[in-house]
Amino acid sequence: MSRTLYDQTLALAGVFQAARLVQQTAHGIPVDPRALETSIRSLFVTVPDTTLDVYGGDLANLHTGLETLASVMSEQSRQQDIDILRYALNLVHLESKLRSRSDLLDVIGNRIEQARHTASHFGHSHPNLLANLASIYTDTISTFRLRIQVTGNPDILQRDENAEKIRALLLAGIRSAVLWRQCGGRRWQLVLARRKVIHTARELARRARHGHPGHPHD
């Protein structure tokens, strides 16, 4: 996997896209269908040629994540930004814990493979698939001491379909955190290289808005 700032920013945008969709779901805010589809589909892209291939090969699929990454990293003045940043940092932390648990990695890999049939039959945003992926998260990631506390509207969070969507998205966020680390991403960069990350995310978000599909040097 390429280890450039471009690739690291794409993967980090994947983490922040999942975190943003979790925040929206928890508050009953309709999510962008394309962003949801991209996040869930990324779980099934296991042998990509490039980082962008994990997200369907099109920057526009990551527009939500790139915009969120740039805005949240530059200012955390709103409660929603604080929540999204907390989710993203927790996902990165959980990925680091997961790396040392080959048993859980095997379970996750095997069960995602089993879920491929559901994905191909129903699509990547179908409640059946989200419930399937949520159960993988519950049986593996939820066994760690660190739990991601999702805050939102209690009535919304209590509905099974919302809870399942959130857990499936958290699993997708961890997949992007794995990719980020494979691209050379490290937690210290979120502090020391913050301005570079923000600048790159803004540039890529601009390209996504204007329909440029790939690398900034294309």
Image: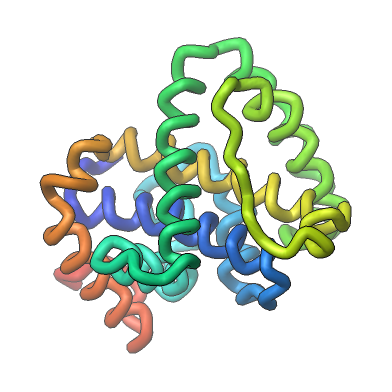
Identify the image quadrant of the C terminus: bottom left
Q: Can residue 7 be seen by looking at this rendering?
A: yes
Number of numbered discs visible in the structure rendering: 0
Q: Nearer the viewer, residue 78 or 170?
A: 78
Q: Nearer the viewer, residue 164 or 28?
A: 28
Q: Can residue 119 be seen by looking at this rendering?
A: no
Residue at 69% from the left image edge and 52% from the top image edge: 166
* Residue 12 as seen in the image, left or right of residue 135: left
Residue at 60% from the left image edge and 73% from the top image edge: 34
Above or below residue 126? Residue 208 is below
Q: Nearer the viewer, residue 130 or 21?
A: 21
* Residue 9 as seen in the image, left or right of residue 20: left
Residue at 49% from the left image edge and 30% from the top image edge: 94
Q: Position of residue 119 (x, y in %)?
A: 77, 51
Above or below residue 75? Residue 159 is above
What color scheme is it?
rainbow
Q: Position of residue 100 (x, y in %)?
A: 46, 13
* Residue 185 as seen in the image, left or right of residue 158: left
Residue at 26% from the left image edge and 39% from the top image edge: 185
| Quadrant of residue 10 within the rendered picture | bottom left
Q: Position of residue 160 (x, y in %)?
A: 87, 52
Q: Position of residue 1 (x, y in %)?
A: 30, 38
